[in-house]
Amino acid sequence: MRCNSCSDKEAIMHFTQIVDNEVTTYHLCESCAAEKGLEPGLAAGDQPLTDLMAQLSEVGRDEREGDDGTCGYCGLELDDFKKSGRLGCSHCYVTFEDHLRRLLRRLHGSTDHVGKVYLPPDPTEAQRRERLAGLKRRLDRAVDREDFERAAVLRDQIRELEAAQG
């Protein structure tokens, strides 16, 4: 398969991008991938997530050189986290917050959750309130954008959730 960008060389990197529910697949040669800031060695398709996380943590290591954070609660060291891709306890999220934020930004492009909120079959009152607050924020944004069809769907979801609260 030929590179989508230059059409001269064989494509060695294949990736799919999804933006606003629109799927685009790219096939790039090594030089075109490098021009776009993509490194073939970082492709996640054939590597376990922990390997990908370890590789990503190496990117920009110079700026963090000498930072040897250790969780004060469980004793997990930053290097151990980088090797395993697993945190030792809930306190590690605070201890390694800067590193986790950089990692999430590289993996997802952001550190803020913008997806759907899971509501279990028997949600607690706090989960219902959180879901309701999220729906109301989305409703406000839809009204601000004058997306009234989406706003109507969100309004109905809010009414349904409020009726279930009783």
Image: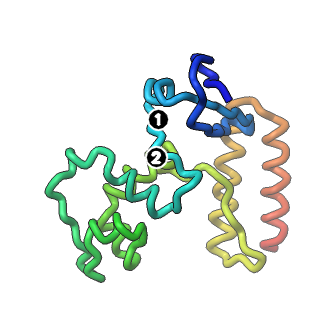
Q: Callout 1, which amino acid?
A: Leu
User: Can you see residue 128?
Assistant: yes
Crowdedness near tag 2: few (<14), some (14–19) or many (≥20) residues, C-alpha within 10 Å = some
* In this view, 14 is above or below 52: above
Q: Which of 109 and 29 lies nearest the eye of the viewer?
A: 29
Image marks 2 and 1: residues in contact by CB distance under 8 Å: yes
Q: Residue at x 37, y 50 (%)?
A: 102
The dot on residue 64 is: none
Q: Position of residue 126 (x, y in %)?
A: 62, 73
Q: Position of residue 127 (x, y in %)?
A: 65, 71
Secondary structure found at label 2? helix
Crowdedness near tag 1: few (<14), some (14–19) or many (≥20) residues, C-alpha within 10 Å = some
Which residue is the site of mark 2? 42
Which residue is the site of mark 1? 38
User: Left of 62 or right of it: where is 120?
Assistant: right
- Distance from label 2 to label 1 (Cα)? 8 Å
Q: Callout 2, which amino acid?
A: Leu
User: Left of 73 or right of it: where is 20?
Assistant: right
Q: Which of 106 and 150 lies nearest the eye of the viewer?
A: 106
Q: Quadrant of the N terminus?
A: top right
Q: Which of 46 and 80 lies nearest the eye of the viewer?
A: 46
Q: Quadrant of the C terminus?
A: bottom right
